[in-house]
Amino acid sequence: MSPPNILFIMTDQQRFDTIAALGHGHARTPNLDRLAARGIACTNAYSSCPVCVPARYTLMTGCEPSKTSWLSNWAPGDNVSTRCGPYLAETLAARGYRTWGLGKFHTEPRHEPLGFETHEYSEELWPTEEDFLRDDYVAWLRRRDPSFNHLEQVHGERTDMYYVPQTRAVPAALTVESWVATRAVEELNRPDPRPQFGFMSFVTPHPPIAPPVPYNRLFNPDDMPDPALGDPAIDSADDYLGWMNHAVWAEDISNAQARQLRARYAGSITFIDECIGKILDAVEARPDAANTLICFFSDHGDHMGDHGAWQKESFFEASCRVPFLVSWPAQLPAAARHTGLAALTDLFGLATAASGAPELRDGHHLLATLRDSAPARDFLVGMFGTPGTSQFKCMIRRGDWKYIWLANGGRELLFNLRLDPAESRSFLTAEPALVTAFRREAADLLAAREVTRPAVLDGGLRSFPFAPFPRVRIKQFARGVTDFGQGPCAS
């Protein structure tokens, strides 16, 4: 069989529990359901550093954040490919693939070459006017309809409006989601004898939560569940979540407001689903449809009020567990479920294995596992924040168990996800020997790499006296505006 086409379809900040076919009744996703029916749903998949930049470098390199050196969006990371080797697109191009990438890449620097033959960007925020005008989607929108040129934020208002239900200022056909889908279909239909590696990265449902008409009113807020709250001691153990709530003006969201946000979040996902349907139609119209490997996933989730938190960057399931679908009709079964552990780190090995020679790097041989020729992952590790500071935290997921270490205060959490999937009960006192084993394992794993070694002190996990993180606001205006009161009408 000839090498397969390989398509990666990625969303931003989409929770794992947002695909209807996987039993989540508050979702309407006919095309993701169709993709799940076409292949295998990995129902225990994780982002090992649940925030935008680290997650993207992980999937492009097959390396964990402990090697890429990106453990937050503000890490002082150097050139990642010097640490990890050629990026995935470079690797597949060297194997004879035509490579194209569309949408959000969120690299540092912003326009870092990643090895794509066709590389078109659409980012979520533009600090300067130059960044705004250089954005490929923005340039397309300005050509299509100059009446929207006045917009500072074409995806929705941020800063104090970050978690306020909104409607997109542009119609559905002119959104970044439609642009990605349209360009993807064009690339799929471009005549070329080479196999294709296509990467499609949607900016949404990342906040601001602003679906276009009519998806803004597709779901009734009264039908949405309230956020799930647990033991206050558990929900507040990670003070970084309180800092983040304040940073994005989300500390006072009521249940009624949360239901409104959840309704529009669901509407955003349904709109993305429709765009994905156009891509699937284009794939299925090709003669090599059965020999096309499609992977769908997100970089991380969103608490959406669960545990009293918003945003991501924690190791609660809502934040770090992601949707993850793999289909390859010529090689893999249809409508199947894989309940073993999987991670974004495994995507590099999945693509290289499918293209002819597995290069796993830090990942697991997921393709072999899905073919029942290798066991599933035994465990996975997550981490976030600068090692050796109070911001650092890590997770080990093994079997039914999840262990979380928080350097701020040396706090620990232990969950049994089979007995308590909502993570409302900590098993610290019930399982002291297990806690000790996890703590020792975490220290050994962190000590093994230079990047994370500062998180270890005298052979154990390094902790700091608990102190609340200082509450500050993050102002995310655009096009050179940096604060309230600025702009042509400010005087």
Image (cartoon, rainbow, N blue to C red):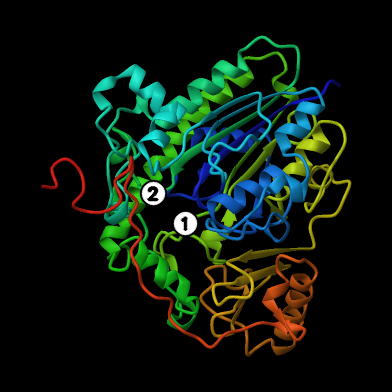
Give the residue type that dot 1 points to: Asp
* Image quadrant assignment for residue 195: top right
| 268 relative position to 49: left or right | left
Taking the spot 34% from the left edge, 17% from the top edge, the residue there is 144
Taking the spot 64% from the left edge, 47% from the top edge, the residue there is 57
Question: Can residue 76 be seen from the camera position used here?
Answer: yes
Mark 2, residues whose alpha carbon is within 10 Å: few (<14), some, or many (≥20)? many
**Depicted 408 relative to depicted 105: above or below:** below
Q: Position of residue 218 (x, y in %)?
A: 32, 39
Report helix, strand or loop for mark 1. loop
Residue under numbered circle 2: 207
Of circles 2 and 1, the one toward us is: 2
* Image quadrant assignment for residue 226: bottom left
Question: Can residue 41 be seen from the camera position used here?
Answer: no
**CA–CA distance in space, label 2 to label 1:** 9 Å
Q: Nearer the viewer, residue 351 or 434?
A: 351
Residue under numbered circle 1: 302
Report helix, strand or loop for mark 2. loop
Q: Nearer the viewer, residue 366 or 100?
A: 100
Quadrant where the N terminus sits is top right
List the single residue furthest toward the left. 491
| 359 relative position to 319: left or right | right
Q: Position of residue 69 (x, y in %)?
A: 67, 58
Give the residue type that dot 2 points to: Pro
